[in-house]
Amino acid sequence: MAAKEKPKRKVVAENRRARFDYEITEVVEAGIVLLGTEVKALREGKANIAESYAAPEDGDIWLINANIPEYSAGNRQNHEPKRKRKLLLHKREIARLAQAVERKGFTLAPMKLYFNDRGIVKLEIGIGQGKKLHDKRETKKDRDWGRQKQRLLRDRG
């Protein structure tokens, strides 16, 4: 029996600080409404979601402050790099995420922006709460100890 193949993803942008700054409890995949020049710029591998966040507004979830630079071969009808972009989710998902943000104090942090196996742009959103300073120190200490343990095992064996 053949093992189930992992879907191919071409990651365009990744927010590596999200797991460090937030205690991520759940990850949701969302589509994103883009203009043609934005998709072309993403295919060139240009995007930055490190300083962006998602927020509920007018019954929808919006990606705010994500930077997709202008397409290099574009004309005067190029897109605005830091415009708000609508995320495509089911109504129930939107309601659940909006409720989590408003009531429980959760944050919607963009994790990855990628092309799925069908060539469609998707955004992974992490739902989580902000970590306190001592939690961040603990995370850093655990990560450093893991690296040191790997080095010790590699040197012995």
Image: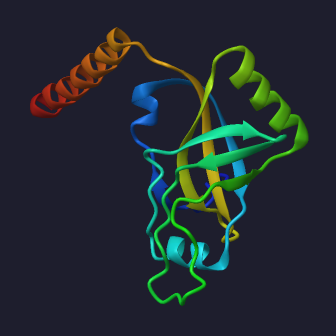
The answer, for residue 24, to whether it is visible in the render is yes
The answer, for residue 1, to whether it is visible in the render is no
In percent of the image, x 16 and y 34: which residue is there? 154
Residue 70 vs residue 151, the one in the foreground: 70
Q: Which quarter of the figure is the C terminus placed in?
A: top left
Find residue 116 and report its image quarter: bottom right
Residue 115 vs residue 88, the one in the foreground: 88
Indicate whether 69 appears above or below 94.
below
Horizontal arrangement in the rendering, residue 44 relative to residue 55 (left or right): left
In percent of the image, x 40 and y 41: which residue is there? 16
Horizontal arrangement in the rendering, residue 61 relative to residue 133 (left or right): right
Q: Where is residue 29 drawn, in percent x and y?
A: 69, 46
Indicate whether 140 appears above or below 43.
above
Find residue 140 and report its image quarter: top left
In percent of the image, x 75 and y 31: which residue is there? 97
Q: Residue furthest top?
A: 134
